[in-house]
Amino acid sequence: MDEMQDGRNTDNQNPIPVHFVDRNARDDEQTWTDRGNAAVQREDYESAAEAFEHAVEANAGDARARYNLALARQFLGDPEGAVAGYRRAIDLDPQLLDAYINLGNVYGELELNRESLEIFQMAQDLAPDNDEICLSVGDAYRAQNLFEDASQAYRQALILNPENAGAADNLRDVRERINDQLRRVMDQERRVDDDPADASRYAELASLYLDMRRYDDALSTANQMLTLDLDSRAGYDMLASVYEQMNDRDQAADTYARIVSLDPNDAEAWEHLGTWRSLQGRNDEAIDAYARAIELDPQRITSRFSLAETYLEAERFDDALSTYRGLIESGEAGQLQSDDLAAAYAGLADTYNSMERYHDAIQTAQTLLERYEDDPEGYYQLAAAYDGLANYDEAITNYQNAIESDPLNADYYNDLADTLREVKRYDEALDVVQQAISMDPSLVLAYETLAQIYTETNRPDEAAEAQSQAETLRSLNED
């Protein structure tokens, strides 16, 4: 295959040249790599993926082998599997530029635009003079409506290569969008000036600022609304929207607390308050807020799920069981979407596992899998139950099934690694936990699993380093 197209939906696709690459390694690895490359030449990507899987097995620490397998999976239409492979390849070789480029493209295909931007920026750090990467950075900004940032990236691409037609076209596009935003802001500011006492005009202006990520201006405008009327529901609604977009949990929670004091019969506001109290770690208050939302609107499914999850987090297991069972009853009566019913069964199995009622968890997870084939949470809860019963072979099989169904879930990899550690399959455990860390570098439990593996394999220095990383991350999370 000569080239791969950028997966993002833009008017001007920018081709990124890619290729499967050999390197000198073990004979077995080289043999399988050769077979994989030959299959690629025939455009037989299934055979290529199978060959590259064998190459990875022959040398699990080879970044190019991982890259080749990820690219084969990408061509087979398995973007999640490709993401997992590219992330592990980057973890093994942080200088592997092709992996960053393809990973950024796949994230774009999955509409994970923040992740796409982050990866392309990392690629830009490696190759600051690459105009095509600058173009991709601009596209990732544009997909998030961050037009000013996108214009800067496109300009940089043109500085590096004045002939980059994609950058020129996209720069014109975002410039028009920026000008349109500015015109709308100016028009709305004039409307505010025409009637400074009309709070609704401030709300429209604040919404425009929010769309442009001009948070200070949006906050100032929302506060102007409250200056006009200290108990303005519209003002607090706008203030809450700004804090939510800024992910300021304390201010968002305080604002929703004010809103429900103004309108105690607003079920949606109570649910929002519950969400932010939960994020603050104030579970009892979150439970009270969710319960109030349900009292006001008994069919509010999102509140019922949130209540069940918070009960589980607070170790109020009987309450969690009751809530999940109620959701399942609603689902059986046709009152839930199929995805919600599956989530209710998964939550019930999770609760049973937390209570160490493993046989009940197995029965619930099997019911889920009978109804929804290859549901990753069904496999995961089944694996956790078998793990609790020390039936490690079944646990490993079902963790692997969960990963196959959802290759992007770092928790699945970590728990599989921990079980492989239990049965002293240390080489496999080490590879899988490193995959977990590559998927989510902030996963504290994965570093703790890594430390355990190193300890049990008599690598004390590496164990201490991994444990130190876990403690650092935990400290950051607590802050």
Image: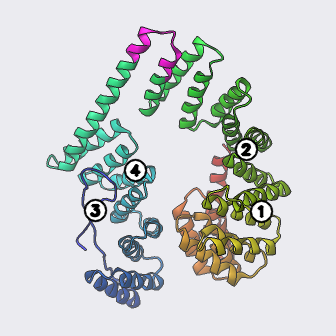
Dominant secondary structure of the magenta stretch?
helix
**In the rendered view, would you say 299 is above or below 189?**
below
Point 39% across, 59% down: residue: 109
Residue 199 painted magenta: yes
Pointers 4 and 2 in contact (C-beta within 8 Å)? no
Mark 1 neighbour density, 10 Å: few (under 14) some (14–19) many (20 or more): many
Pointer 1 or 4: first along the chain: 4
Quarter of the figure with the N terminus: bottom left
Of 67 and 339, which appears nearest the observer? 339
- Tag 4 secondary structure: helix
Point 74% across, 77% down: residue: 386
Of 463 and 153, which appears nearest the observer? 153
- Tag 3 secondary structure: loop
Give the CA distance from mark 1 to mark 4.
Answer: 37 Å
| Corner quadrant of residue 324 | bottom right
Pointer 3 or 4: first along the chain: 3
Point 73% across, 60% down: residue: 328
Residue 336 painted magenta: no
Disc 3 marks which residue? 5
Span shown in magenta: 189-203
Mark 4 neighbour density, 10 Å: few (under 14) some (14–19) many (20 or more): many
Of 45 and 320, which appears nearest the observer? 320
Pointer 2 or 3: first along the chain: 3
Give the CA distance from mark 3 to mark 4.
Answer: 17 Å
Disc number lying in front (2 or 3): 3
Mark 2 neighbour density, 10 Å: few (under 14) some (14–19) many (20 or more): some
Pointer 2 or 1: first along the chain: 2
Tell me the kind of residue under disc 3: Gln
Pointer 1 or 3: first along the chain: 3
Tell me the kind of residue under disc 4: Leu
